[in-house]
Image (cartoon, grey):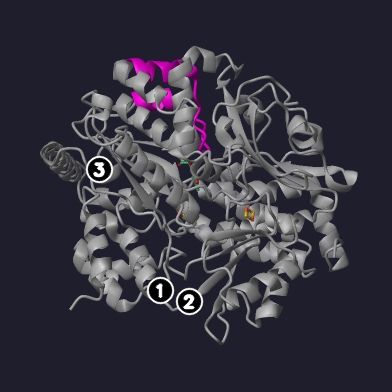
Amino acid sequence: MPVTDAPRIVTARLVYDDSYTLERYLATGGYEGLRKALSMTPEAVSAEVDTASLLGRGGAGFPAGRKWSMLRKDPVTYLVVNGDESEPATFKDHLLMERDPHQLVEGVLIAAYALQVTEAFIYIRGEFALGLDRVTQALNEAYDYGAAGSDIFGSGFSVDVVVHPGAGAYICGEETALLESLEGKRGFPRIKPPFFPAAIGLYGQPTVVNNVETMSNLPWIVLHGGKEFAGLGEGRSAGTRLFALSGHVRRPGTYEVEMVKTTFRDLVYAPVYGGGVPGDRDVKAIIPGGVSAPWFGPERLDLPLGQDEVGNAGSMLGSGAITVMDSSTCVVRAAWRITKFFARESCGQCTPCREGSGWLERVLRRIEQGEGREDDVDLLLDVSDNISPGLQWPPQQTTICVLGPSIPSSIHSAIDMFRDELLQHVKEGRCPFD
Amino acid sequence: MSHFDSETAARARELVALYPERRSALIPLCHLAQEQDGWLRPEAMEEIASIVGVTPAEVRGTATFYDMLRTQPVGRYLVSVCTNIACLLGGAEELLEHAEHTLGVRAGGTTSDGTITLEDAECLADCDRTPCVAVNHRYVGGLTPDAFDQLVADLRAGRRDGEIPPHGTLGRVRRNGGLRVPVEQVARERAAAAEARAAREQAAREQAARAQAAEGPGAAKSQGAGA
Ligand SMILES: Cc1cc2nc3c(=O)[nH]c(=O)nc-3n(C[C@H](O)[C@H](O)[C@H](O)COP(=O)(O)O)c2cc1C
Ligand code: SF4
Ligand code: FES
């Protein structure tokens, strides 16, 4: 039994083996949302999305309706969909692309109509070979079916949608880096201001960038109305959300749950979700929203899965990736691996991020290998403070994008919560978990 | 002399036609070149440069930013073992060590017969089946050391060729046509956009010139330090 009786909004079709086919899609209400949208004015469609309080599912949680309303007026604007999903332990967008690509395509077409763009791009992480195939196939079918291209369903509205493959770079998930990449360049994030996509985006034109899951909610919202969506969850955190649950749980996987009404504990322990920790070991820490997020201890398990609830507690729901670490976990190793990731993926434009990530990685590695020094913990904090002054949440930013200020999250958490464990590595000259 | 064979060249033309600006096709064309050659050869980069209208150095400079674009030859099979956080908690370090032992190469290396390149990968977004392994970007599930050895044997014997094409082949489904929105409409809009952009850039230049004139020669320097 799920914890609440909220309907499944984006994963309803996943019970079918052929969920990705046009036949199944049409048999389960597919493209009805688009038909309905086309019978409304673009403004009315946007208003429904605004009423729904659909918070962006890519990481920052910005309301989609508001983002759309901020688009600078211009004869040519673009819609770009972010399917780059590479925040470690996030595996929900690829599920939507592989298993329900028509839902994504329909969402994109609805947004394109609301925004009145004539060309939209779906940027898919290069490594998603199957996702690329499935979305391209769905798009081909949508064109043949008359749902995409020129004069859609005889409405007079026309839009082309292009699937664009990435090529392996985490930073291209950051929206301005993604636009650079889509323009055929290195994925260097742009400085904001002035390069807010809504003002100066793709090819210098106003651009809306939205996440795959954000888009996938649109067919349901248009069909059932924004009010119905806003009636699920609580406050700003409306609707359901996908959470990718990984690490030390019996049943890792992607689960769609009602926001706020469900807690971390539900997700980790409910038999329909995580099913508890293997060996009934204790939870040592959880990463609540991707590796950029500060960790929580077990005392936070009863916190509701809501944007503001988690934000006020000093972390974020971020990309919807929840990783559980049980009592057998070496937190130094965990923090080291996360930091190594950032060191590899830093684009190198900003000194604090480029140099800091490498230093932090090397210091953590030597602590983990039993070669740490007395003052290494202070050194870690000092370098972290140089990347993100004050080590507060939300972080201060001295860099072009927020990858930099995300680096200290795991390190600061590990030191805050498990300082003794770090010191034990140094004192004993070895990893106590080896 | 074209480096692309006729089929690849035709697909390259289709790709370029999808974008408002040619350069956007650069990365898709690099993937296409890898599909033809298995990796990104210098000749291919030159050809791509001439197609999208940049220098070969710009193609190389862009390609080397991206992990999937290989400017050195790789094995027929790129075996990626994820060692990021979820997989780390699921035994990835042990699996990678085992893989290095089985294949006789360190992560990043290619077996002497040129069949397999082993990679210590970042999160592959399949974190509920740990430790996650992918071959040429096709998931093969979370693997035990024994299952890994079986996979290697299968790859070597060609038993997985149906599901796993050689390195470089990414999407196997092709778009079934170009843009459909009437070209005149698109052209009109793009011309308007180009005009608007030129006007914006001109205004920005004038503003910058005015600011510099107003603040004197020291202005540019202090601005540089603050950026
Ligand atoms: C380093 C970094 C990586 C990001 N990666 C992704 C990503 O993989 N997918 C995504 O949708 N958003 C990602 N984002 C967030 C995007 O910049 C952007 O906020 C989002 O795509 C907007 O869509 P939404 O409003 O629908 O959430 C990333 C941001 C940063 C700073
Ligand atoms: S913060 Fe890091 S990733 Fe972001 S632009 Fe600066 S160097 Fe690049
Ligand atoms: S952490 Fe290994 S696949 Fe995500």
Residue labelled with disc 3:
A204
Q: Residue at x 83, y 54 (%)?
A: A421
Asked where in the image residue B168 lies, by quadrant, the reply is bottom left
How far is disc 1 from disc 2 in space, using C-alphas? Answer: 7 Å
Identify residue type, mark 2. Val
Residue labelled with disc 2:
B74
Any part of residue A372 in sight: no
Instruction: For the N terminus of chain B, give its image quadrant.
Output: bottom left
Q: Residue A201: give x, y in percent of width and height.
A: 30, 41
- Queried whether the magenta region covers residue A116, the answer comes back as no
**In the image, are marks 1 and 2 on the same chain?**
yes
> Could you tell me if the residues under marks 1 and 2 are in contact, i.e. CB atoms within 8 Å?
yes
Identify residue type, mark 1. Trp
Question: Label 1's element?
Answer: loop
Asked where in the image residue A317 lies, by quadrant, the reply is top right
Write down the region rendered in magenta: A44-69
Front position among marks 2 and 3: 2
